Amino acid sequence: MHDAGTGSTRAPSRRTVLAAGAGLTAALALTPDTARAAGHDDERLTTLISRMTLEEKVGQLFVMRVYGHSATDPDQADIDANLKEIGVRTAAELIAKYRVGGIIYFNWAHNTRSPHQIADLSNGIQKASLDQPRGLPVLIATDQEHGIVARVGRPATLFPGAMAIGAGASRSDARELGRISGAELRALGIRQDYSPDADVNVNPANPVIGVRSFGADPEAVAGLAAAEVKGYQASGVAATAKHFPGHGDTAVDSHFGFPVITHSRELWERLDAVPFRAAIHAGIDAIMTAHIMVPALDGSGDPATLSRPIVTGILREELGHDGVVVTDSLGMEGVRQKYGDDRVPVLALNAGVDQLLNPPSLDIAWNAVLGAVRDGELTEPRLDASLLRVLRLKAKLGLLDRPWVTAAGVDRTVGIPEHLRAADRLADRTTTLLVNKEDVLPLSRRTHPRLLVAGADPASPSGSDGPPTTVLAKALTALGFTATTLSTGTAPSSATIDEAVTAAGNADAVVVATYNVSATDSQRTLVGRLAATGKPVIAIAVRNPYDVAQLPDVTACLASYSWTDVELRAAARVIAGRVRPRGRLPVPVPRADDPTRELYPIGYGLSY
Protein backbone atom coordinates (compact mmCIF):
# COMPACT_ATOMS: atom_id res chain seq x y z
CA MET A 1 0.00 0.00 0.00
CA HIS A 2 1.37 3.37 -1.02
CA ASP A 3 0.91 6.68 0.67
CA ALA A 4 -1.73 9.15 -0.46
CA GLY A 5 -1.21 10.98 -3.69
CA THR A 6 0.90 8.36 -5.43
CA GLY A 7 -1.92 7.20 -7.68
CA SER A 8 -0.84 3.61 -7.15
CA THR A 9 -3.28 2.31 -4.54
CA ARG A 10 -3.20 -1.41 -4.02
CA ALA A 11 -4.59 -3.69 -1.37
CA PRO A 12 -2.11 -4.81 1.29
CA SER A 13 -0.81 -8.34 1.07
CA ARG A 14 -2.54 -11.09 3.03
CA ARG A 15 0.33 -10.99 5.52
CA THR A 16 -0.13 -7.23 6.01
CA VAL A 17 -3.87 -7.60 6.48
CA LEU A 18 -3.42 -10.35 9.05
CA ALA A 19 -0.83 -8.37 10.97
CA ALA A 20 -2.91 -5.19 10.93
CA GLY A 21 -6.04 -7.04 11.98
CA ALA A 22 -4.44 -9.24 14.61
CA GLY A 23 -6.20 -7.41 17.44
CA LEU A 24 -9.57 -7.92 15.79
CA THR A 25 -9.22 -11.64 15.14
CA ALA A 26 -7.76 -12.24 18.59
CA ALA A 27 -10.67 -10.47 20.23
CA LEU A 28 -13.11 -12.55 18.19
CA ALA A 29 -11.20 -15.73 19.09
CA LEU A 30 -11.36 -16.71 15.42
CA THR A 31 -8.84 -17.33 12.70
CA PRO A 32 -9.33 -15.03 9.69
CA ASP A 33 -10.62 -17.98 7.63
CA THR A 34 -13.14 -19.19 10.20
CA ALA A 35 -14.24 -15.60 10.89
CA ARG A 36 -14.96 -15.15 7.22
CA ALA A 37 -16.79 -18.45 7.01
CA ALA A 38 -18.80 -18.07 10.19
CA GLY A 39 -19.74 -14.44 9.72
CA HIS A 40 -20.04 -11.94 12.54
CA ASP A 41 -23.16 -12.57 14.60
CA ASP A 42 -24.12 -10.71 17.72
CA GLU A 43 -22.43 -13.20 20.01
CA ARG A 44 -19.05 -12.58 18.40
CA LEU A 45 -19.61 -8.84 18.28
CA THR A 46 -20.60 -8.82 21.94
CA THR A 47 -17.42 -10.72 22.74
CA LEU A 48 -15.43 -8.10 20.89
CA ILE A 49 -17.15 -5.32 22.82
CA SER A 50 -16.49 -7.04 26.14
CA ARG A 51 -12.75 -6.91 25.49
CA MET A 52 -12.62 -3.21 24.72
CA THR A 53 -11.56 -0.58 27.20
CA LEU A 54 -13.99 2.16 28.17
CA GLU A 55 -11.87 4.69 26.29
CA GLU A 56 -12.03 2.58 23.14
CA LYS A 57 -15.81 2.24 23.43
CA VAL A 58 -16.24 5.98 23.75
CA GLY A 59 -14.02 6.65 20.76
CA GLN A 60 -15.92 4.18 18.57
CA LEU A 61 -19.05 6.31 18.86
CA PHE A 62 -17.46 9.41 17.30
CA VAL A 63 -17.27 10.28 13.62
CA MET A 64 -14.73 13.07 13.19
CA ARG A 65 -13.38 15.38 10.52
CA VAL A 66 -9.66 15.54 9.87
CA TYR A 67 -7.66 17.69 7.48
CA GLY A 68 -5.36 16.31 4.85
CA HIS A 69 -5.05 14.17 1.72
CA SER A 70 -2.96 11.54 3.55
CA ALA A 71 -3.41 9.65 6.81
CA THR A 72 0.23 10.10 7.79
CA ASP A 73 1.76 12.85 5.64
CA PRO A 74 -0.65 15.76 5.05
CA ASP A 75 0.41 19.18 3.86
CA GLN A 76 1.73 21.58 6.47
CA ALA A 77 -1.38 23.77 6.30
CA ASP A 78 -3.51 20.73 7.12
CA ILE A 79 -1.21 19.76 9.99
CA ASP A 80 -1.63 23.26 11.37
CA ALA A 81 -5.44 23.05 11.03
CA ASN A 82 -5.51 19.66 12.75
CA LEU A 83 -3.35 20.92 15.62
CA LYS A 84 -5.56 23.97 16.06
CA GLU A 85 -8.94 22.21 15.92
CA ILE A 86 -8.24 18.66 17.11
CA GLY A 87 -4.86 18.69 18.88
CA VAL A 88 -3.30 16.09 16.59
CA ARG A 89 -1.21 16.35 13.45
CA THR A 90 -2.68 13.64 11.25
CA ALA A 91 -5.55 11.21 10.79
CA ALA A 92 -3.29 8.45 12.14
CA GLU A 93 -2.67 10.46 15.31
CA LEU A 94 -6.39 11.18 15.64
CA ILE A 95 -7.11 7.45 15.57
CA ALA A 96 -4.30 6.58 17.97
CA LYS A 97 -5.37 9.20 20.52
CA TYR A 98 -9.14 8.89 20.42
CA ARG A 99 -9.79 5.53 18.71
CA VAL A 100 -12.59 7.09 16.67
CA GLY A 101 -14.94 4.66 14.96
CA GLY A 102 -15.68 6.90 11.99
CA ILE A 103 -14.17 9.67 9.88
CA ILE A 104 -16.09 12.04 7.62
CA TYR A 105 -14.55 13.33 4.40
CA PHE A 106 -14.92 16.92 3.21
CA ASN A 107 -13.55 18.57 0.10
CA TRP A 108 -12.75 21.70 2.11
CA ALA A 109 -10.64 19.51 4.45
CA HIS A 110 -8.65 18.42 1.38
CA ASN A 111 -9.73 14.79 1.80
CA THR A 112 -11.10 14.40 -1.72
CA ARG A 113 -8.62 15.66 -4.30
CA SER A 114 -8.69 12.73 -6.74
CA PRO A 115 -9.95 9.14 -6.85
CA HIS A 116 -6.61 7.43 -6.24
CA GLN A 117 -5.72 9.88 -3.49
CA ILE A 118 -9.06 9.23 -1.76
CA ALA A 119 -8.51 5.48 -1.98
CA ASP A 120 -4.98 5.85 -0.58
CA LEU A 121 -6.30 8.00 2.28
CA SER A 122 -8.97 5.40 3.05
CA ASN A 123 -6.41 2.60 3.14
CA GLY A 124 -4.09 4.71 5.29
CA ILE A 125 -6.89 5.36 7.77
CA GLN A 126 -7.77 1.67 7.95
CA LYS A 127 -4.15 0.67 8.48
CA ALA A 128 -3.71 3.27 11.22
CA SER A 129 -6.76 1.92 13.03
CA LEU A 130 -6.01 -1.78 12.59
CA ASP A 131 -2.47 -1.22 13.83
CA GLN A 132 -3.87 -0.26 17.25
CA PRO A 133 -4.40 -2.86 19.98
CA ARG A 134 -7.87 -4.36 19.40
CA GLY A 135 -8.00 -2.20 16.31
CA LEU A 136 -11.24 -2.00 14.35
CA PRO A 137 -11.85 -0.81 10.81
CA VAL A 138 -13.09 2.78 10.49
CA LEU A 139 -16.48 3.56 8.98
CA ILE A 140 -15.63 6.34 6.51
CA ALA A 141 -18.53 8.60 5.54
CA THR A 142 -19.29 11.67 3.48
CA ASP A 143 -22.17 13.84 2.24
CA GLN A 144 -22.62 12.81 -1.38
CA GLU A 145 -26.19 13.92 -2.00
CA HIS A 146 -25.38 15.04 -5.57
CA GLY A 147 -26.73 18.29 -6.93
CA ILE A 148 -25.61 21.16 -4.73
CA VAL A 149 -24.04 18.92 -2.04
CA ALA A 150 -21.27 16.64 -3.30
CA ARG A 151 -17.99 16.20 -1.42
CA VAL A 152 -16.41 13.98 -4.09
CA GLY A 153 -16.13 15.81 -7.39
CA ARG A 154 -15.08 14.89 -10.87
CA PRO A 155 -13.80 12.64 -12.29
CA ALA A 156 -16.30 10.74 -10.12
CA THR A 157 -19.78 10.61 -11.61
CA LEU A 158 -21.98 13.49 -10.47
CA PHE A 159 -25.74 13.15 -10.75
CA PRO A 160 -28.64 15.59 -10.61
CA GLY A 161 -29.69 16.46 -7.08
CA ALA A 162 -32.77 15.29 -5.22
CA MET A 163 -35.27 17.90 -6.46
CA ALA A 164 -34.19 17.27 -10.05
CA ILE A 165 -34.77 13.55 -9.48
CA GLY A 166 -38.14 14.56 -8.03
CA ALA A 167 -38.88 16.40 -11.27
CA GLY A 168 -38.05 13.25 -13.20
CA ALA A 169 -40.29 11.26 -10.82
CA SER A 170 -38.65 7.94 -11.70
CA ARG A 171 -37.97 5.53 -8.87
CA SER A 172 -35.81 3.44 -11.18
CA ASP A 173 -33.68 6.52 -11.86
CA ALA A 174 -33.35 7.15 -8.12
CA ARG A 175 -32.31 3.58 -7.57
CA GLU A 176 -29.80 3.72 -10.43
CA LEU A 177 -28.31 6.90 -8.98
CA GLY A 178 -27.85 5.16 -5.63
CA ARG A 179 -26.42 2.02 -7.21
CA ILE A 180 -23.83 3.84 -9.33
CA SER A 181 -22.91 6.44 -6.72
CA GLY A 182 -22.67 3.72 -4.08
CA ALA A 183 -20.38 1.62 -6.24
CA GLU A 184 -18.06 4.58 -6.79
CA LEU A 185 -17.99 5.56 -3.12
CA ARG A 186 -17.27 1.98 -2.11
CA ALA A 187 -14.36 1.83 -4.57
CA LEU A 188 -12.92 4.89 -2.80
CA GLY A 189 -13.25 3.32 0.66
CA ILE A 190 -16.26 5.45 1.64
CA ARG A 191 -18.83 3.08 3.11
CA GLN A 192 -21.47 5.42 4.54
CA ASP A 193 -23.24 8.16 2.61
CA TYR A 194 -25.25 10.79 4.46
CA SER A 195 -27.96 10.60 1.80
CA PRO A 196 -30.78 10.63 0.79
CA ASP A 197 -32.44 13.75 2.14
CA ALA A 198 -35.88 12.54 3.22
CA ASP A 199 -37.21 15.99 4.15
CA VAL A 200 -40.48 17.12 2.54
CA ASN A 201 -39.76 20.69 1.41
CA VAL A 202 -43.07 22.52 1.86
CA ASN A 203 -41.56 25.93 2.64
CA PRO A 204 -40.25 27.89 -0.38
CA ALA A 205 -38.25 30.06 2.04
CA ASN A 206 -36.35 27.07 3.45
CA PRO A 207 -32.71 28.23 3.39
CA VAL A 208 -31.01 24.91 4.14
CA ILE A 209 -33.04 22.16 2.43
CA GLY A 210 -34.79 23.43 -0.71
CA VAL A 211 -33.50 21.53 -3.74
CA ARG A 212 -31.81 18.97 -1.48
CA SER A 213 -35.33 17.54 -1.02
CA PHE A 214 -37.11 15.41 -3.62
CA GLY A 215 -40.14 17.68 -3.34
CA ALA A 216 -43.27 18.69 -1.45
CA ASP A 217 -45.41 15.57 -1.93
CA PRO A 218 -44.67 13.17 0.95
CA GLU A 219 -45.62 10.03 -0.99
CA ALA A 220 -43.44 11.02 -3.95
CA VAL A 221 -40.53 11.85 -1.63
CA ALA A 222 -41.01 8.53 0.16
CA GLY A 223 -40.90 6.50 -3.04
CA LEU A 224 -37.78 8.20 -4.37
CA ALA A 225 -35.97 8.15 -1.03
CA ALA A 226 -36.67 4.44 -0.56
CA ALA A 227 -35.50 3.69 -4.10
CA GLU A 228 -32.25 5.56 -3.56
CA VAL A 229 -31.71 3.73 -0.27
CA LYS A 230 -32.05 0.40 -2.05
CA GLY A 231 -29.60 1.48 -4.74
CA TYR A 232 -26.91 2.60 -2.31
CA GLN A 233 -27.23 -0.41 -0.07
CA ALA A 234 -27.23 -2.86 -2.98
CA SER A 235 -23.76 -1.46 -3.76
CA GLY A 236 -22.49 -2.06 -0.23
CA VAL A 237 -22.73 1.51 1.05
CA ALA A 238 -24.83 2.45 4.07
CA ALA A 239 -27.49 4.98 3.16
CA THR A 240 -28.51 7.56 5.77
CA ALA A 241 -31.94 9.20 5.62
CA LYS A 242 -31.96 12.72 7.01
CA HIS A 243 -32.94 14.94 8.83
CA PHE A 244 -35.29 13.21 11.29
CA PRO A 245 -37.99 14.11 12.26
CA GLY A 246 -38.18 16.39 9.21
CA HIS A 247 -36.47 19.68 8.30
CA GLY A 248 -38.63 20.64 5.30
CA ASP A 249 -40.76 23.42 6.81
CA THR A 250 -38.42 25.98 8.29
CA ALA A 251 -37.11 29.40 7.37
CA VAL A 252 -34.12 29.01 9.73
CA ASP A 253 -30.88 27.25 8.83
CA SER A 254 -29.89 24.94 11.70
CA HIS A 255 -26.24 25.56 10.89
CA PHE A 256 -26.70 29.09 12.23
CA GLY A 257 -29.88 29.07 14.32
CA PHE A 258 -32.40 26.86 16.10
CA PRO A 259 -35.43 26.13 13.88
CA VAL A 260 -38.85 25.42 15.34
CA ILE A 261 -41.26 23.21 13.39
CA THR A 262 -44.85 24.02 14.35
CA HIS A 263 -46.52 21.02 12.70
CA SER A 264 -49.16 19.25 14.75
CA ARG A 265 -48.62 15.59 15.53
CA GLU A 266 -51.29 14.69 12.97
CA LEU A 267 -49.65 16.82 10.26
CA TRP A 268 -46.24 15.37 11.10
CA GLU A 269 -47.62 11.83 10.72
CA ARG A 270 -49.00 12.45 7.23
CA LEU A 271 -46.24 14.76 5.97
CA ASP A 272 -42.80 14.54 7.58
CA ALA A 273 -42.94 10.96 8.84
CA VAL A 274 -43.93 9.37 5.53
CA PRO A 275 -40.48 9.26 3.84
CA PHE A 276 -38.77 8.05 7.02
CA ARG A 277 -41.29 5.23 7.37
CA ALA A 278 -40.60 4.28 3.75
CA ALA A 279 -36.83 4.37 4.29
CA ILE A 280 -37.14 2.12 7.35
CA HIS A 281 -39.37 -0.26 5.40
CA ALA A 282 -36.69 -0.31 2.68
CA GLY A 283 -34.13 -1.47 5.26
CA ILE A 284 -32.26 1.80 5.79
CA ASP A 285 -28.95 1.31 7.57
CA ALA A 286 -28.85 4.68 9.32
CA ILE A 287 -30.93 7.77 10.07
CA MET A 288 -29.56 11.22 10.87
CA THR A 289 -31.24 13.47 13.42
CA ALA A 290 -32.03 17.15 12.96
CA HIS A 291 -31.16 20.03 15.27
CA ILE A 292 -34.74 21.30 15.26
CA MET A 293 -37.42 21.75 17.90
CA VAL A 294 -40.78 20.07 17.26
CA PRO A 295 -43.04 20.94 20.22
CA ALA A 296 -45.78 18.55 19.09
CA LEU A 297 -43.33 15.65 19.43
CA ASP A 298 -41.44 16.85 22.52
CA GLY A 299 -42.51 19.84 24.58
CA SER A 300 -39.20 20.16 26.45
CA GLY A 301 -37.72 22.68 24.04
CA ASP A 302 -34.78 20.39 23.27
CA PRO A 303 -33.53 19.82 19.72
CA ALA A 304 -34.60 16.49 18.24
CA THR A 305 -30.99 15.27 18.38
CA LEU A 306 -31.12 15.47 22.18
CA SER A 307 -34.73 14.33 22.62
CA ARG A 308 -35.36 10.89 24.07
CA PRO A 309 -39.10 11.09 23.23
CA ILE A 310 -38.18 11.67 19.56
CA VAL A 311 -35.11 9.45 19.07
CA THR A 312 -36.06 6.53 21.30
CA GLY A 313 -39.81 6.97 21.69
CA ILE A 314 -40.75 7.75 18.08
CA LEU A 315 -37.87 6.72 15.83
CA ARG A 316 -36.95 3.48 17.56
CA GLU A 317 -40.10 2.34 19.37
CA GLU A 318 -42.89 3.67 17.15
CA LEU A 319 -41.28 3.57 13.69
CA GLY A 320 -39.21 0.48 14.48
CA HIS A 321 -35.76 1.66 13.37
CA ASP A 322 -33.15 -0.57 15.00
CA GLY A 323 -30.29 0.53 12.79
CA VAL A 324 -27.72 3.21 13.48
CA VAL A 325 -28.79 6.72 14.48
CA VAL A 326 -26.24 9.43 13.77
CA THR A 327 -26.44 13.06 14.80
CA ASP A 328 -26.14 15.89 12.36
CA SER A 329 -22.89 17.79 12.90
CA LEU A 330 -22.50 18.74 16.55
CA GLY A 331 -20.75 21.92 15.46
CA MET A 332 -24.03 23.41 14.20
CA GLU A 333 -25.67 26.19 16.19
CA GLY A 334 -29.03 24.43 16.29
CA VAL A 335 -27.69 21.90 18.80
CA ARG A 336 -25.35 24.24 20.68
CA GLN A 337 -27.65 27.12 21.63
CA LYS A 338 -29.27 25.50 24.65
CA TYR A 339 -26.41 23.38 26.04
CA GLY A 340 -22.63 23.55 26.17
CA ASP A 341 -20.38 21.41 24.00
CA ASP A 342 -19.63 19.17 26.98
CA ARG A 343 -23.32 18.38 27.54
CA VAL A 344 -24.46 17.86 23.96
CA PRO A 345 -22.81 14.45 23.30
CA VAL A 346 -23.93 13.07 26.65
CA LEU A 347 -27.52 14.19 26.12
CA ALA A 348 -27.49 12.81 22.57
CA LEU A 349 -26.44 9.38 23.81
CA ASN A 350 -29.07 9.52 26.54
CA ALA A 351 -31.62 10.34 23.83
CA GLY A 352 -30.70 7.15 21.98
CA VAL A 353 -28.28 8.12 19.21
CA ASP A 354 -25.34 5.87 18.32
CA GLN A 355 -22.85 8.01 16.40
CA LEU A 356 -21.73 11.50 17.43
CA LEU A 357 -20.81 13.43 14.30
CA ASN A 358 -18.10 16.05 14.08
CA PRO A 359 -18.13 17.84 17.44
CA PRO A 360 -16.44 21.26 17.44
CA SER A 361 -13.96 20.01 20.05
CA LEU A 362 -13.41 16.26 20.05
CA ASP A 363 -11.38 16.48 23.25
CA ILE A 364 -14.21 18.15 25.15
CA ALA A 365 -16.84 15.79 23.75
CA TRP A 366 -14.80 12.59 24.22
CA ASN A 367 -13.90 13.45 27.81
CA ALA A 368 -17.47 14.50 28.56
CA VAL A 369 -18.82 11.08 27.52
CA LEU A 370 -16.03 9.31 29.39
CA GLY A 371 -16.76 11.36 32.50
CA ALA A 372 -20.50 10.75 32.23
CA VAL A 373 -19.92 6.99 32.30
CA ARG A 374 -17.54 7.22 35.24
CA ASP A 375 -19.98 9.46 37.11
CA GLY A 376 -22.94 7.17 36.40
CA GLU A 377 -24.95 9.54 34.18
CA LEU A 378 -24.34 7.13 31.29
CA THR A 379 -23.91 3.42 31.79
CA GLU A 380 -21.46 1.18 30.03
CA PRO A 381 -24.31 -1.10 28.84
CA ARG A 382 -25.83 1.98 27.19
CA LEU A 383 -22.58 2.50 25.24
CA ASP A 384 -22.48 -1.21 24.42
CA ALA A 385 -25.93 -1.05 22.83
CA SER A 386 -24.79 1.66 20.43
CA LEU A 387 -21.49 -0.09 19.83
CA LEU A 388 -23.34 -3.23 18.84
CA ARG A 389 -25.40 -1.34 16.28
CA VAL A 390 -22.29 0.30 14.83
CA LEU A 391 -20.41 -3.01 14.69
CA ARG A 392 -23.39 -4.75 13.10
CA LEU A 393 -23.25 -2.14 10.37
CA LYS A 394 -19.51 -2.52 9.90
CA ALA A 395 -19.96 -6.29 9.72
CA LYS A 396 -22.82 -6.00 7.22
CA LEU A 397 -20.68 -3.78 4.99
CA GLY A 398 -17.82 -6.29 5.09
CA LEU A 399 -15.46 -3.92 6.83
CA LEU A 400 -14.55 -6.42 9.52
CA ASP A 401 -13.23 -8.79 6.86
CA ARG A 402 -11.92 -6.58 4.08
CA PRO A 403 -11.68 -2.82 4.63
CA TRP A 404 -9.17 -2.24 1.83
CA VAL A 405 -9.65 -0.78 -1.63
CA THR A 406 -7.47 -1.05 -4.72
CA ALA A 407 -6.33 1.02 -7.67
CA ALA A 408 -7.87 -1.53 -10.02
CA GLY A 409 -11.20 -1.12 -8.27
CA VAL A 410 -11.00 2.65 -8.64
CA ASP A 411 -10.12 2.45 -12.32
CA ARG A 412 -12.88 0.04 -13.26
CA THR A 413 -15.56 1.88 -11.27
CA VAL A 414 -15.09 5.61 -10.71
CA GLY A 415 -16.24 7.97 -13.45
CA ILE A 416 -16.34 5.30 -16.14
CA PRO A 417 -18.12 6.17 -19.42
CA GLU A 418 -21.07 3.92 -18.63
CA HIS A 419 -21.73 5.82 -15.39
CA LEU A 420 -21.30 9.23 -17.00
CA ARG A 421 -23.78 8.33 -19.74
CA ALA A 422 -26.26 7.20 -17.09
CA ALA A 423 -25.95 10.57 -15.33
CA ASP A 424 -26.68 12.40 -18.59
CA ARG A 425 -29.69 10.17 -19.29
CA LEU A 426 -31.11 10.86 -15.86
CA ALA A 427 -30.52 14.60 -16.23
CA ASP A 428 -32.34 14.65 -19.57
CA ARG A 429 -35.48 13.50 -17.76
CA THR A 430 -35.36 16.24 -15.10
CA THR A 431 -35.15 19.66 -16.81
CA THR A 432 -38.50 21.42 -16.39
CA LEU A 433 -39.89 23.96 -18.88
CA LEU A 434 -42.15 26.44 -17.10
CA VAL A 435 -42.58 29.26 -19.63
CA ASN A 436 -42.32 29.15 -23.42
CA LYS A 437 -43.90 32.26 -24.94
CA GLU A 438 -44.44 32.16 -28.69
CA ASP A 439 -42.82 28.71 -28.69
CA VAL A 440 -39.36 30.29 -28.68
CA LEU A 441 -37.90 26.97 -27.55
CA PRO A 442 -36.26 25.06 -28.96
CA LEU A 443 -33.96 27.75 -30.28
CA SER A 444 -32.98 27.40 -33.90
CA ARG A 445 -29.34 27.82 -34.93
CA ARG A 446 -30.68 29.39 -38.10
CA THR A 447 -32.68 32.17 -36.50
CA HIS A 448 -30.73 32.59 -33.23
CA PRO A 449 -27.13 31.57 -33.92
CA ARG A 450 -25.51 34.09 -31.56
CA LEU A 451 -26.21 33.76 -27.86
CA LEU A 452 -25.21 35.78 -24.83
CA VAL A 453 -25.01 33.65 -21.71
CA ALA A 454 -25.19 35.88 -18.64
CA GLY A 455 -26.29 35.71 -15.05
CA ALA A 456 -25.46 34.30 -11.65
CA ASP A 457 -22.33 32.25 -11.07
CA PRO A 458 -22.50 30.64 -7.61
CA ALA A 459 -19.41 28.77 -6.46
CA SER A 460 -18.65 25.94 -8.84
CA PRO A 461 -18.87 22.35 -7.59
CA SER A 462 -15.67 20.35 -7.22
CA GLY A 463 -14.36 19.23 -10.60
CA SER A 464 -16.71 21.48 -12.58
CA ASP A 465 -15.89 22.76 -16.04
CA GLY A 466 -16.32 26.24 -14.59
CA PRO A 467 -19.04 28.61 -13.38
CA PRO A 468 -22.58 28.09 -14.73
CA THR A 469 -22.34 30.72 -17.47
CA THR A 470 -19.13 29.11 -18.75
CA VAL A 471 -20.57 25.58 -18.64
CA LEU A 472 -23.74 26.68 -20.42
CA ALA A 473 -21.80 28.58 -23.08
CA LYS A 474 -19.53 25.60 -23.74
CA ALA A 475 -22.49 23.25 -23.99
CA LEU A 476 -24.43 25.54 -26.33
CA THR A 477 -21.37 26.11 -28.50
CA ALA A 478 -20.89 22.35 -28.77
CA LEU A 479 -24.50 22.16 -29.96
CA GLY A 480 -23.83 24.55 -32.85
CA PHE A 481 -24.45 28.02 -31.43
CA THR A 482 -21.92 30.80 -30.99
CA ALA A 483 -22.14 31.60 -27.30
CA THR A 484 -20.33 34.32 -25.37
CA THR A 485 -20.38 34.72 -21.59
CA LEU A 486 -20.84 37.55 -19.13
CA SER A 487 -20.94 36.68 -15.46
CA THR A 488 -23.19 39.17 -13.73
CA GLY A 489 -23.26 37.53 -10.29
CA THR A 490 -26.07 36.99 -7.83
CA ALA A 491 -26.36 40.72 -7.06
CA PRO A 492 -25.51 42.59 -10.29
CA SER A 493 -24.71 46.28 -9.97
CA SER A 494 -26.21 48.95 -12.20
CA ALA A 495 -22.96 49.11 -14.17
CA THR A 496 -22.96 45.33 -14.66
CA ILE A 497 -26.59 45.40 -15.80
CA ASP A 498 -25.74 48.16 -18.31
CA GLU A 499 -22.84 46.04 -19.59
CA ALA A 500 -25.15 43.06 -20.06
CA VAL A 501 -27.71 45.13 -21.95
CA THR A 502 -24.99 46.42 -24.26
CA ALA A 503 -23.68 42.89 -24.84
CA ALA A 504 -27.20 41.70 -25.65
CA GLY A 505 -27.18 44.04 -28.64
CA ASN A 506 -24.74 41.73 -30.39
CA ALA A 507 -26.74 38.57 -29.67
CA ASP A 508 -29.82 37.00 -31.22
CA ALA A 509 -31.04 35.69 -27.87
CA VAL A 510 -29.97 35.81 -24.23
CA VAL A 511 -29.69 32.88 -21.85
CA VAL A 512 -29.55 34.07 -18.25
CA ALA A 513 -28.86 31.96 -15.16
CA THR A 514 -30.81 33.04 -12.07
CA TYR A 515 -30.19 32.08 -8.45
CA ASN A 516 -32.88 32.44 -5.76
CA VAL A 517 -34.42 35.64 -7.11
CA SER A 518 -36.44 37.78 -4.70
CA ALA A 519 -38.84 40.67 -5.30
CA THR A 520 -36.16 43.25 -4.52
CA ASP A 521 -33.30 41.38 -6.16
CA SER A 522 -31.16 43.13 -8.77
CA GLN A 523 -31.22 39.86 -10.73
CA ARG A 524 -34.89 40.71 -11.38
CA THR A 525 -33.84 44.11 -12.69
CA LEU A 526 -31.23 42.48 -14.92
CA VAL A 527 -33.76 40.14 -16.50
CA GLY A 528 -36.27 42.96 -16.98
CA ARG A 529 -33.68 45.19 -18.68
CA LEU A 530 -32.55 42.35 -20.94
CA ALA A 531 -36.17 41.62 -21.92
CA ALA A 532 -36.68 45.29 -22.74
CA THR A 533 -34.08 44.98 -25.51
CA GLY A 534 -36.59 42.94 -27.50
CA LYS A 535 -34.28 39.94 -27.68
CA PRO A 536 -35.68 36.59 -26.51
CA VAL A 537 -34.60 35.97 -22.91
CA ILE A 538 -34.40 32.36 -21.72
CA ALA A 539 -33.96 32.13 -17.96
CA ILE A 540 -32.61 29.04 -16.22
CA ALA A 541 -33.33 28.87 -12.50
CA VAL A 542 -30.13 27.13 -11.40
CA ARG A 543 -31.26 26.49 -7.84
CA ASN A 544 -34.82 26.94 -6.61
CA PRO A 545 -37.58 26.75 -9.23
CA TYR A 546 -39.46 29.50 -7.37
CA ASP A 547 -37.47 32.09 -9.40
CA VAL A 548 -40.02 31.90 -12.22
CA ALA A 549 -42.59 33.79 -10.14
CA GLN A 550 -40.25 36.80 -10.03
CA LEU A 551 -39.51 36.79 -13.78
CA PRO A 552 -42.69 37.84 -15.61
CA ASP A 553 -40.79 39.35 -18.55
CA VAL A 554 -38.87 36.28 -19.70
CA THR A 555 -39.65 34.64 -23.02
CA ALA A 556 -38.90 31.19 -21.62
CA CYS A 557 -37.94 29.78 -18.26
CA LEU A 558 -36.39 26.45 -17.31
CA ALA A 559 -35.68 24.92 -13.91
CA SER A 560 -32.47 22.89 -13.65
CA TYR A 561 -32.56 22.58 -9.82
CA SER A 562 -28.77 22.94 -9.58
CA TRP A 563 -25.79 24.47 -11.32
CA THR A 564 -23.79 21.27 -11.62
CA ASP A 565 -22.39 20.46 -15.06
CA VAL A 566 -24.66 17.47 -15.66
CA GLU A 567 -27.82 19.53 -15.10
CA LEU A 568 -26.62 22.57 -17.05
CA ARG A 569 -25.65 20.42 -20.03
CA ALA A 570 -29.12 18.86 -19.93
CA ALA A 571 -30.71 22.32 -19.91
CA ALA A 572 -28.57 23.29 -22.92
CA ARG A 573 -29.81 20.21 -24.79
CA VAL A 574 -33.40 21.27 -24.05
CA ILE A 575 -32.73 24.80 -25.29
CA ALA A 576 -31.21 23.44 -28.50
CA GLY A 577 -33.99 20.91 -29.04
CA ARG A 578 -31.75 17.87 -28.73
CA VAL A 579 -34.03 16.49 -26.02
CA ARG A 580 -37.59 17.40 -25.09
CA PRO A 581 -38.24 18.80 -21.61
CA ARG A 582 -39.75 16.02 -19.52
CA GLY A 583 -39.43 17.29 -15.94
CA ARG A 584 -42.48 18.21 -13.89
CA LEU A 585 -42.46 20.45 -10.82
CA PRO A 586 -42.05 18.40 -7.64
CA VAL A 587 -43.00 21.48 -5.58
CA PRO A 588 -45.67 24.12 -6.12
CA VAL A 589 -44.51 27.61 -7.10
CA PRO A 590 -46.40 30.33 -5.22
CA ARG A 591 -47.39 33.59 -6.86
CA ALA A 592 -45.13 36.56 -6.23
CA ASP A 593 -48.02 38.89 -5.41
CA ASP A 594 -49.87 36.39 -3.20
CA PRO A 595 -47.75 33.53 -1.80
CA THR A 596 -50.90 31.81 -0.48
CA ARG A 597 -51.94 31.05 -4.08
CA GLU A 598 -50.17 28.81 -6.57
CA LEU A 599 -48.70 30.10 -9.79
CA TYR A 600 -47.83 26.56 -10.88
CA PRO A 601 -48.91 23.37 -9.07
CA ILE A 602 -46.96 20.20 -8.40
CA GLY A 603 -46.79 18.27 -11.66
CA TYR A 604 -46.71 21.31 -13.94
CA GLY A 605 -44.33 21.34 -16.86
CA LEU A 606 -44.42 22.14 -20.55
CA SER A 607 -43.00 20.25 -23.48
CA TYR A 608 -42.67 20.78 -27.22
Image: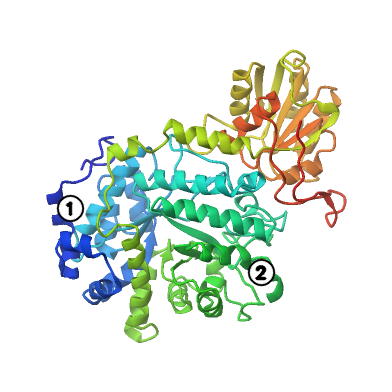
Q: Position of residue 403 (x, y in %)?
A: 27, 53
Q: Where the C terminus falls, by quadrant?
A: top right
| Figure check: 592 above or below 335 | above
Query: SS of the residue at dot 2?
Result: loop
Q: Position of residue 308 (x, y in %)?
A: 52, 79
In this rendered view, identify the residue nearer to me: 97 or 128. Answer: 128
Query: SS of the residue at dot 1?
Result: helix
In this rendered view, identify the residue nearer to me: 318 or 163. Answer: 318
Q: Position of residue 478 (x, y in %)?
A: 59, 19
| Figure check: 251 above or below 517 | below
Name the residue beneath numbered marker 2.
260
- Total marks placed: 2
Residue that appears at 51% across and 32% down: 421
In this rendered view, identify the residue nearer to me: 558 or 469. Answer: 558
Quadrant hosting residue 31: bottom left
The label number, if any, that marks residue 17 in the structure image: 1
What amino acid type is highlighted by mark number 2?
Val
